[in-house]
Amino acid sequence: MITLGLEEKNEILSEVNRRSGANVLECYQCGKCVSTCPVSNYMDYPPRETMQMIKLGLKNELLMANSSWFCLTCSACSGRCPREIDIPAVMEAIRHIAIEENYINDSKKVKEIRKFHEIFLDMVKRYGRNYELRMMAEFNIRTRNLFKDMHLAPKALLKGKIPLGVKPMKSAKAIQRMYKLAEKLDKKHL
Ligand code: SF4
Ligand code: SF4
């Protein structure tokens, strides 16, 4: 089949397709995803261009771009895609490959987003859920922006929007086991 032939020669295409379960070759460049995406203006390559770059095998450019990091996983694009391509899953696959292969986008925003991801996952691993107050504090410390949004804290606390403590979920232990298993599987596939 032509599709298989293209995938064999295009490492990033086959890897993104494998991880996302999508078939990027199905994209016919209509641009509906771009017109729907709320953050396409901020991306180095909006979703339509990202699809085309995958098809062309432009691995370095893709993995260094901010596009996959700026993706909100909102699925607005895939909801309108006439080819029903799971674009957020494609973006996620690109992020994972970039992390595993140590591609580092040096922009401040991307670095902050990466830290936010790490801290959020760490919270879920520890408590089985997010702990907003701690997450905000850790984010500010790790991005060296100690007083960021501090003026909002008293109001949010008084209104009970941010709880002071966190009660770990009953399923926290099971979630920790899932993390361990996922880490083991990751190592196996590296
Ligand atoms: S909406 Fe779907 S088919 Fe159209 S450009 Fe975007 S990914 Fe490709
Ligand atoms: S899922 Fe990502 S690429 Fe798609 S519309 Fe949302 S932000 Fe844009």
Image (cartoon, grey):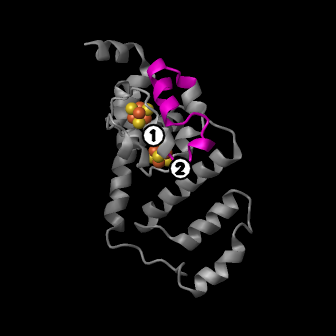
Determine whether the residue tagged by mark 2 lies in a helix, strand or loop. Answer: loop
Seen in the image, is 173 located left or right of residue 44?
A: left
Of the residues shown, which amino acid type is indicated by label 2? Pro
Query: On the rendered structure, is 67 left or right of 172?
Result: right
Q: Nearer the viewer, residue 41 or 56?
A: 41
Q: Nearer the viewer, residue 179 or 158?
A: 158
Based on the picture, tell me whether residue 47 belongs to the magenta stretch. yes
Where residue 58 appears, as percent x and y from the top left, is: 53, 21
Q: Where residue 78 appears, x then y in whole percent? A: 38, 43
Marker disc for residue 38: 2
Whether residue 135 sits left or right of residue 15 in the image: it is right
Q: Is mark 2 within 8 Å of ligand 2?
A: yes
Image quadrant containing the N terminus: top left
Q: Picture coordinates of residue 5 (x, y %)? A: 32, 12
Residue identified by numbered label 1: 33
Relative to 53, say whether 85 is above or below. below
Please, what secondary structure does the residue beneath circle 1 have?
helix
Q: Is residue 156 visible?
A: yes
Q: Is residue 20 left or right of residue 50?
A: left
The answer to the question of whether label 1 and label 2 lie on touching residues, with beta carbons closer than 8 A, is no
Q: Residue 16 in the image: x percent, y percent?
A: 40, 30
Mark 2: give few (<14), some (14-19) or many (20+) Cα within 10 Å: some
Q: Which residue is at 48% across, 19% downward?
A: 57
> Image height check: is 63 above or below 68?
above
Span shown in magenta: 37-60
Q: Main secondary structure of the magenta part?
A: helix
Q: In the picture, residue 185 is in which quadrant?
A: top left
- Quadrant of the image for the C terminus? top left
Disc sitting over residue 45 in the figure: none
Q: Residue visible at 63% across and 61% down?
A: 139
The quadrant holding residue 110 is: top right
Determine if the C-beta at disc 1 is less than 8 A from ligand 1: yes
